[in-house]
Image (cartoon, grey):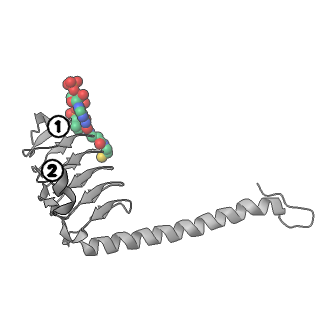
Amino acid sequence: MNVIQATGGISPVNKVPMINDLLYRVFDRFLRGYEDFKVRRMKRSFKSCGERVYISPKCFIWSEDCLEVGNDVCIHAFTYIFAVGGVKIGNGAMISSNCSITSTTHPIESAKRFAEDEITKPVIIGKNTWLGMGAVLLPGITIGDDSIVGAGSVVTKNVPPKSIVVGNPAKVLRKIEL
Ligand SMILES: CC(C)(COP(=O)(O)OP(=O)(O)OC[C@H]1O[C@@H](n2cnc3c(N)ncnc32)[C@H](O)[C@@H]1OP(=O)(O)O)[C@@H](O)C(=O)NCCC(=O)NCCS
């Protein structure tokens, strides 16, 4: 609460929070503008990007030009995508926060690991899929249409359509009746 002094002014003590609040608002507005700009720029760098795509500005995408995104897709904060080997995200896919999707790996033999190129295998995330928080998709994986990957699951093999998979390594929990 501001204390109005007898002189009609605001106490210098009370000016500090007001100035802090103003600075916060100005900086916050600037940051939001910057984040919107960053996401728009990111989408333009994709190999393709559909309509009504929400991407959190706090996502990390490597090799943006190798990422294909369909319509009505959302990708939440702290999801990390290594797209260099090609990652395709189908229409209506929901990718929750903290997911890791990689289309690249390294040779197993340590001597070759730095000397040779990375090994790339495309990842395909089908239509109307849902990756729960913290799901991990390894190189070469296809998630079938309408399937769900449970939170924290590590997908090491292809997921058939209309299936719920959970665990590490992810296994089919049950099929989805549509
Ligand atoms: C996969 C999921 C959709 C399954 O939901 P459900 O069908 O209601 O599953 P249930 O709670 O009935 O669990 C069934 C079994 O699977 C196991 N299970 C469920 N989710 C699991 C997960 N993510 N990892 C490992 N096991 C899981 C349960 O422990 C249970 O095992 P049990 O039969 O031995 O007791 C849900 O558990 C999940 O992970 N949702 C993601 C939530 C999320 O990330 N939200 C973020 C906002 S988008």
Q: Which image quarter: residue 39?
A: bottom left
- The reply to whether the residue tagged 1 has its Cβ within 8 angstroms of ligand 1 is no
Q: Quadrant of residue 80?
A: bottom left
Asked which quadrant contains residue 26, the reply is: bottom right
Answer yes or no: is residue 89 visible.
Answer: no
Residue 129 percent coordinates (x, y): 17, 50
Amino acid residing under circle 2: Glu
**Category of crowding for the residue at label 1, using alpha-carbon neighbours closer than 10 angstroms: few (below 14), some (14–19), many (at least 20):** few
Q: What element carries label 1?
A: loop
Q: Mark 2 points at which residue?
A: 109
User: Residue 169, which numbered label?
Assistant: 1
Which residue is painted at 38% across and 71% down in the image?
38
Q: Nearer the viewer, mark 1 or mark 2?
A: 2
What's the CA distance linking mark 1 and mark 2?
23 Å
Do tag 1 and tag 2 residues touch (Cβ < 8 Å)? no
**Residue 69 vertical position relative to residue 79 in the rendered view, above or below:** below
Quadrant position of the N terminus in the picture: bottom right
Q: Which of 10 and 134 is in front in this view?
A: 134
Spot occupied by residue 137 in the image (x, y as percentages of width and height) = 19, 49
